[in-house]
Amino acid sequence: MRYAAFISYSHEADSRRAQHLRDALHHFARPWNSMRALRIFLDNAALSADPGLWSTVEQALADSEFLVLMASPQSARSTWVAKEISWWRQGPRARNLLLVVTGGELHWDHTAQDFDWTRTTCLSPALSGFFNEEPRHVDLRWMGQNHTGDLREPQFRACVADLAAPLHKRPKDELIGEDVLQRRKFQHFRRAMVAAITALALLASAVAVYAIVQRNTAQKQRALPPPVNWPRQH
């Protein structure tokens, strides 16, 4: 697969959250010598001006292992989100759908084995009858629009770990340990690079000082009067 996940969301409600989530998934448990841990499709970041917009989105869906749905009342009303869900339901990886709730209400009806659509306000009707048991979801309703998306913030970090675990196909606790390990490796590498750059700077300074001393010495020697050759006494 070209992408680990495709993020489906409402631009009206979740543009900033979607960008923060994409960036966090790129960096969480990222090998210290790699650009990203996972490749995530987000339309604002990945799409260029293209007259065949839906065909490009459809190709990205086909190239994604998971669909991450950012559920909100706005996405529940979005025709684009409904279209992406409908495509995913008919695709080969339909069960690889992860819910991230960013607003509204989510209620499961254990009798009907489906969401209670009279009280659920954040899901598109395109998901009606899709789940046969209550799915787990990541709750980002606490995350305001002014959140920085900093992975050092514990609550955001925990939510990213919940979502990253199935994408990496690894247990959450193991993945958190891997993230800590890779961050330490990067810090060691950064310290080594800083030490090397500092040593090179000091060496360059020493060479420059030596060159200046040599130049000044040569200038002083050239400024001295020529030696007097006295006639020999016979």
Image (spheres, rainbow, N blue to C red):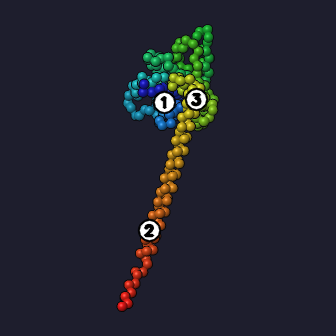
* Direction front: furthest residue: 234
User: Which residue does the numbered mark 2 point to in the structure image?
Assistant: 215
Q: Which residue is mark 3?
A: 176
- Compared with 144, 121 (above or below) is above
Q: Nearer the viewer, residue 83 or 59?
A: 59
Image location (x, y in percent) of residue 6: 48, 26
Circles 3 and 1 in contact, beta carbons < 8 Å: no
Q: CA distance from mark 3 to mark 1?
A: 15 Å
Question: Dot 3 lies on which element?
Answer: helix
Tell me the kind of residue under disc 3.
Ile
Spatial separation of the CA atoms under disc 2 and disc 3: 58 Å
Q: Are the residues flagged by discs 2 and 3 in contact, CB closer than 8 Å?
A: no
Disc 2 marks a residue whose amino acid type is: Arg
The quadrant of the rendering that contains the C terminus is bottom left
Mark in front: 3 vs 1: 3
| Residue depicted at 50% across the width and 27% down the height | 7
What residue is drawn where x is 49% and y is 58%?
205
Q: Earlier in the sequence, mark 2 or mark 3?
A: 3
**Residue hosting label 1:** 38
Give the vertical position of 50 relative to 232 (above or below): above
Disc with the residue nearer the chain's start (3 vs 1): 1
Which element is circle 2 on?
helix
Q: Residue at x 58, y 36 (%)?
A: 150
